Image (cartoon, coloured by chain):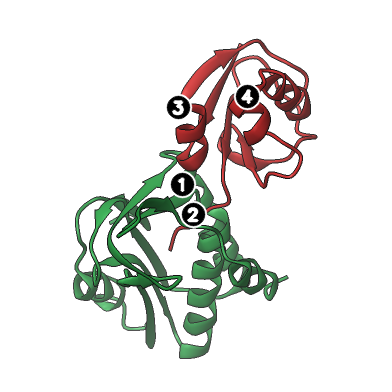
């Protein structure tokens, strides 16, 4: 399985975690981040969401983030799966799973990857509310989160 | 020639997803040309607009130079994850 997958279909969290830990007895920790679609954003009820991306650049940007994570920590495996297209509340949007010998590196690397994905990977969310469709604005808190790693 | 792509809100506001343009020295020159089209183009590429850009699928800035055959993209700040 590729380290990076962009897909319209839902994904199986347990299967991905199993793949990271099976057949590798040196894995002592797998940390998984799951980003989910909420039914509320900025005070409005959201019924569906559409995720657009820049095919080609998305994979390239994520590859660079994973390469940097590999340079910073001693990791035994990483997976990023991001859905695109139509999504509903409670759907999983993104998964970042990191395997390492001890939990510390897996926790830090997992947070690093999602922080950089949020500010560097070319995805855009458009949400449907009672007032019509709107593009989601980038959050300052996301760029602040990225700066912590400098 | 260079290929220019627009994504998300920019694609909708400009009513186009891609086009081919004559090669110019750098992104700054390209932005000036796009702004000179006036109307929505002047708004989208206005000084007060927060726009991200890439060349050959790598993040770039107005100083990034361009060469024949490059793929340029303009898009709003990203909101994935």
Q: Secondary structure at mark 1?
A: helix
- Looking at the image, how many numbered discs can be counted on the residues? 4
Of circles 2 and 3, the one toward us is 3
Question: Any idea which chain is the red one in this picture?
Answer: B
Question: Circle 1 sits on which residue?
Answer: A58
Alpha-carbon span between mark 2 and mark 3: 23 Å
Question: Circle 3 sits on which residue?
Answer: B17
Q: Which quarter of the image is occupied by the N terminus of chain A?
A: bottom left
Q: Quick check: do tags 1 and 4 share a chain?
A: no
Name the subunit of mark 1: A
Question: Any idea which chain is the green one in this picture?
Answer: A
Question: Circle 4 sits on which residue?
Answer: B39
Q: Residue shown at 29%/78% (left/top)?
A: A21
Q: Residues within 10 Å of mark 3 (few under 14, many from 20)?
A: some
Image height check: is A142 above or below A87? Answer: below
Q: Residue shown at 45%/58% (left/top)?
A: B80
């Amino acid at each position: 399985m590729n380290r990076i997958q962009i897909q319209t279909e839902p994904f199986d969290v347990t299967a991905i975690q199993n793949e990271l830990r099976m057949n590798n007895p040196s894995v002592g920790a797998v940390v998984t981040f799951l980003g989910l679609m909420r039914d509320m954003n900025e005070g409005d009820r959201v019924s569906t969401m559409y995720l657009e991306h820049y095919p080609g650049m998305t994979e390239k940007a994520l590859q660079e983030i994973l390469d940097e994570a590999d340079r910073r920590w001693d990791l035994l495996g990483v997976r990023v799966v991001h859905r695109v297209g139509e999504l509903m509340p409670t759907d999983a949007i993104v998964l970042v799973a990191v395997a390492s010998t001890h939990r510390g590196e897996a926790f830090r690397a997992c947070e690093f990857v999602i922080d950089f994905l949020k500010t560097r990977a070319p995805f855009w969310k458009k949400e449907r509310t009672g007032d019509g469709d709107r593009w989601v604005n980038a959050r300052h808190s996301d760029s602040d989160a990225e700066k912590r790693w400098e | 020639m260079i290929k220019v792509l627009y994504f998300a809100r920019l694609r909708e506001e400009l009513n186009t997803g891609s086009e081919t343009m004559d090669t110019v020295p750098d992104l700054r020159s390209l932005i000036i040309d796009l702004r000179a089209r006036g109307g929505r183009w002047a708004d989208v590429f206005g000084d007060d607009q927060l726009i991200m850009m890439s060349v050959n699928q790598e993040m770039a800035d107005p100083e990034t130079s361009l060469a024949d055959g490059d793929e340029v993209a303009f898009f709003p700040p990203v909101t994935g994850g």
